[in-house]
Amino acid sequence: MRLKDDNKAQIIRRKAIEMIVKEGFDGLSMQKLAKSAKISPSTIYIYFENREDLLNKLFMETEADFEKDALRNFDPGIPFEEGLWLQWKNRYKNITKDPLRFYFHEQFRNSPLIKHKDIKQTEFRKNISQFVKNAVARKEIAALPQEIFWAIAYGPFYTLIKFHLDESTMAGTKFSLTEQKMKQAFQLVMKSLKS
Amino acid sequence: MRLKDDNKAQIIRRKAIEMIVKEGFDGLSMQKLAKSAKISPSTIYIYFENREDLLNKLFMETEADFEKDALRNFDPGIPFEEGLWLQWKNRYKNITKDPLRFYFHEQFRNSPLIKHKDIKQTEFRKNISQFVKNAVARKEIAALPQEIFWAIAYGPFYTLIKFHLDESTMAGTKFSLTEQKMKQAFQLVMKSLKS
DNA sequence: AAGATAAGCGAATGTTCGTTCGTTTATAAT
DNA sequence: ATTATAAACGAACGAACATTCGCTTATCTT
């Protein structure tokens, strides 16, 4: 018998994301996807149950990757300022290294395709939660409802990322998020959080 | 001769937004839209050139409305803290009063349908820009690159709004953005910005 | 009241959609 | 080398798509 070709599945995934980013969800058809991946439409159905399954898997895998990447070199025990800055830098690197995945993720997250029922306690969330608890216990930062903490600690970062990516796809590139500017914003955020 | 019926155009707009929010851009077909608005498909083409024109107009009108609403009771001359808080409250009211428009706007903004070429200097942008300039001149806040200012001043707000709206469409509603919590976040933001 | 004009209709166009099916082909296991 | 198995194919399915066209109808102007 013949085995599934992981490489083929990867090409399908990649081309799907490219098409969605370029043309939106209505721009992704199974036949166009097959053509761009140089396979038969029916072959897609060997690797994915159907269109919806393909989209869901793409999203879940992308999200899992982002969470894993964000934890690179991270340990919940490190000092707060150092840890949050590492998070910012990790995320910045992962997003700018391959913006297509971020665009796709954002598009999916803001669409009705997302079913936000099960916010499962991932390894990632456990890590971050412990990290914050430690920092509060050490009195490095003030105790806050987690949503408010998240809004202050990451809201400005993602706003800057979006400015950066939006402008980089425009004619007159006016804003580029250098590490220096990121640091400037980061220090303002730290000013908020320090107890 | 017979005049165009503004009310009919409004129904088309409203139903289109409802369909997009519920089913995404691929869930909006001209025939389904016609049926839900109880008109003939061809009638839509009296009010909009085609599907793309409909979507673009919906977005531009929604954005214009948001900008207008955000300026209610606002004057660029008022003290900074008061002015920024008014902005937060205006936006909160407009979004929660009719979340569908916000969902649609976010979905469109994160899709490739958006063509971010012309960031025209709207009345809105002029107002905000002048407001910030005044505050800096009065030394109420520190001078910052406008993107960093925007990220700090509004990033946390929109992150909270998304938590609020996401959770309110879920089974176990865990987070609700009360005015008290919004104020708590706001004060942290002010701590960042104050010079 | 009459005429002119554009709103409004529903059927029809050709195209593209997601998915399936019968067949062929490659390859792991024997 | 043979066989069994599942990958891979391309044509084909009916359904749904955006848009148009010839016609009817409502209403503003005279």
Image (cartoon, coloured by chain):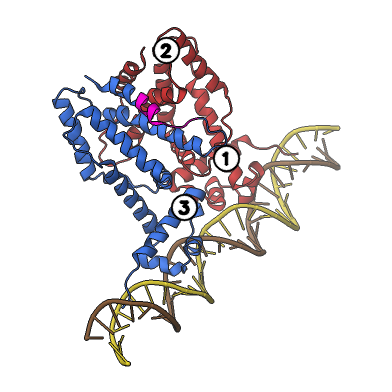
Chain colours: A blue, B red, C brown, D yellow
Is C19 on the left-hand or right-hand side of B6?
left
Q: Nearer the viewer, mark 3 or mark 2?
A: 3
Residue B80: numbered disc: 2
Q: Secondary structure at mark 2?
A: helix
Q: Quadrant of the N terminus of chain B?
A: top right
Q: Give yes or no for residue A180 being in the magenta stretch.
A: yes
Subunit under mark 1: B
Q: Residue A61: percent from the left, percent from the top?
A: 32, 52
Kindly identify the amino acid type of the residue bearing the numbered disc 3. Glu
Residues rendered magenta in the picture: A175-185
Residue A4 drawn at (x, y percent) = 33, 69
Q: Quadrant of the C terminus of chain B?
A: top left
Q: CA–CA distance between discs 1 and 2?
A: 34 Å
For residue A91, the mark is none
Dots 3, 2 in contact, CB < 8 A? no
Mark 1: amino acid? Asn
Q: Chain of mark 2?
A: B
Q: Mark 3 — residue? A: A18
Label 3 sits on a secondary structure element that is helix
Label 1 crowding class (10 Å Cα cut-off): few <14, some 14-19, many 20+? some
Amino acid type of the residue tagged 2 in the rendering:
Phe
| Front tag of 1 and 2 | 2
Query: Disc 1 marks which residue?
Result: B56
How packed mark 2 is, by other alpha carbons closer than 10 Å (few <14, some 14-19, many 20 or more), is many
- What's the chain of the residue with tag 3? A
| Whole-number angstrom distance, CA of label 3 to CA of label 2 | 43 Å
Circle 3 crowding by C-alpha within 10 Å: few under 14, some 14–19, many from 20: some
Please name the residue shown 43% across and 32% down the image: A177
